[in-house]
Image (tube, grey):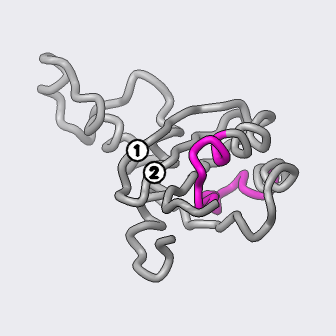
């Protein structure tokens, strides 16, 4: 694992968001997978994108999710990142990357509800939080 890419996981009871960001913080990969598949999925995606670090949101379901990830990854590869307010940021990111249509654009951004789960964008928010801390970046 030598590139500057990071893989972030937003843990959840039933599903987890996954995002891979390059060293320039550009989104390379997004997905939402069942929690039961998170360990193997993270392993495959991390290898495919040659990630330097695996970031895990340190929220409610992180304990069970990290157990699954560690079945396929080394403990030193996983870093816990605070995930407070990532869902709020995820909604903003969703609309940033998926601009609303004509009528929806009349609704203030804070009142728009994305038409699908945004766990993948919550993972982006976790990665961005990590990458924005100068001492943490790979």
Q: Residue at x 63, y 58 (%)?
A: 54
Q: Secondary structure at mark 1?
A: strand
Reply above or below: 66 against 18: below
Pointer 1 residue: 27
Looking at the image, which is closer to me, 84 or 10? 10
Q: Position of residue 46 (x, y in %)?
A: 64, 47
Residue 37 vs residue 54: left or right?
A: right
- Residue 57 is one of the magenta-drawn residues: yes
Quarter of image, res 13:
top right
Magenta residues, as a range? 45-64
Q: Rounded to the nearest whole Å, what is the CA distance between mark 2 and mark 1?
A: 5 Å
Q: Which residue is situated farthest in the bottom direction here?
A: 135
Q: Is residue 138 above or below residue 40?
A: below
Vertical comparison of 40 with 133: above or below = above
State the mark number for residue 21.
2
Taking the magenta stretch, the answer to whether it contains residue 56 is: yes
Label placed on residue 12 = none
Answer with left or right where residue 62 lies relative to residue 90: right
Provide residue 126's location: percent of width, then percent of height.
50, 57
Q: Quadrant of residue 92?
A: top left
């Amino acid at each position: 694992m030598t590139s500057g890419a990071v893989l972030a996981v937003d843990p959840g009871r039933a599903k987890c968001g996954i995002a891979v960001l390059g060293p320039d913080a550009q989104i390379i990969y997004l997905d939402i997978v069942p929690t039961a598949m998170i360990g193997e999925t993270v392993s495959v995606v991390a290898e495919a994108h040659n990630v330097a670090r695996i970031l895990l949101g340190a929220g409610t379901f992180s304990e069970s999710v990290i157990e699954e990830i560690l079945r396929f990854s080394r403990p030193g590869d996983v870093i816990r990142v605070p995930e407070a307010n990532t869902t709020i940021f995820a909604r903003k990111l969703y609309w940033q990357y998926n601009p609303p249509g004509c009528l929806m654009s009349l609704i203030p951004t804070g009142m728009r509800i994305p038409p699908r789960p945004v766990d993948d964008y919550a993972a982006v928010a976790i990665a961005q939080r990590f990458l924005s801390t100068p001492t943490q970046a790979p």
